[in-house]
């Protein structure tokens, strides 16, 4: 079997066994997807701080193993900000023409986050190498956030320098 659908309509794994499916349990307090609790709204009564820390630690571990979980939401927000500068300009919210800010937010923010997120998740799986460590995910993410914050403040030279730090820090394996 090669991981495709068999003739009986059941998805089979690579060794002929049924493919694993993530278990999803929906409760009033939240979702539990493959054993990881995702709270919705308020926390359940009796929830301890150690349980919350355990969930945060599991989410952080998932973000390091699958960087798209950290980079895609940041990229979405930066893309939204990159587009939002135009209505702000035309409504008089900002006075400087936003072409440079728009371009930098879209390329150095939106696009870069999606590229880093996708390649950081798919690359190790395709090449059968260990997933990224925390520092290998956090260094470029923090540098991208800093670069785009500087671009929003009009400090484009410093923003570009911070973007170069993000680019080169993604190439260093710790």
Image (cartoon, rainbow, N blue to C red):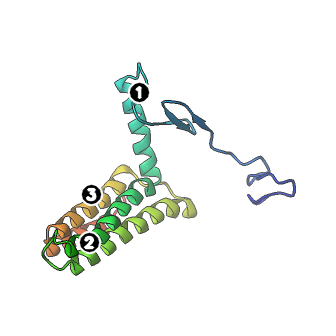
Identify the element where label 1 is drawn.
Answer: helix
Nearest to viewer (mark 3 / mark 2): 2
Q: Position of residue 120 (x, y in %)?
A: 45, 61
In the image as oriented, which residue stretches furthest toward the front?
A: 91
Which circle marks residue 142 in the picture? 3
Q: Residue at x 29, y 65 (%)?
A: 81
Residue at which label 2 appears: 87
Q: Earlier in the sequence, mark 3 or mark 1?
A: 1
Quadrant of the rendered image containing residue 86 = bottom left
Q: Which quadrant is the N terminus positioned in?
A: bottom right
Q: Quadrant of residue 48?
A: top left
Residue 43 in the image, given as x and y percentages of width and height = 40, 28
Q: Is residue 56 left or right of residue 88?
A: right
Near-viewer residue (64 or 47): 47
Q: Position of residue 126 (x, y in %)?
A: 57, 63
Residue 133 in the image, given as x and y percentages of width and height? 39, 51
Q: Earlier in the sequence, mark 2 or mark 1?
A: 1
Label 3 vs 2, first from the N-terminus: 2
Judged by depth in the image, the label closer to the viewer, 2 or 1, is 2
Q: Is residue 96 above or below residue 118?
A: below
**Residue where numbered disc 1 is placed:** 51
Q: Nearer the viewer, residue 129 or 68?
A: 68
| SS at circle 2 | helix
């Amino acid at each position: 079997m090669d991981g495709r659908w068999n003739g009986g309509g059941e998805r089979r794994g690579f060794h002929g066994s049924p493919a694993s499916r993530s278990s999803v349990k929906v409760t009033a307090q939240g979702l539990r997807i493959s054993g990881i609790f995702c709270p919705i709204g308020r926390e359940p009564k009796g929830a301890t701080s150690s349980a919350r820390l355990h969930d945060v630690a599991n989410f952080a571990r998932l973000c390091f193993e699958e960087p798209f979980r950290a980079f895609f939401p940041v990229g979405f927000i930066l893309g939204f900000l990159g587009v939002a500068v135009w209505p702000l300009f035309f409504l008089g919210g900002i006075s400087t023409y936003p072409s440079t800010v728009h371009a930098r937010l879209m390329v150095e923010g939106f696009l870069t986050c999606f590229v880093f997120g996708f390649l950081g998740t798919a690359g190790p799986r395709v090449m059968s190498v260990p997933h990224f460590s925390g520092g290998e995910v956090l260094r470029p993410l923090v540098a991208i956030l800093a670069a785009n914050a500087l671009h929003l403040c009009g400090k484009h030279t410093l923003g570009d320098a911070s973007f170069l730090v993000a680019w080169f820090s993604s190439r260093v394996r710790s």
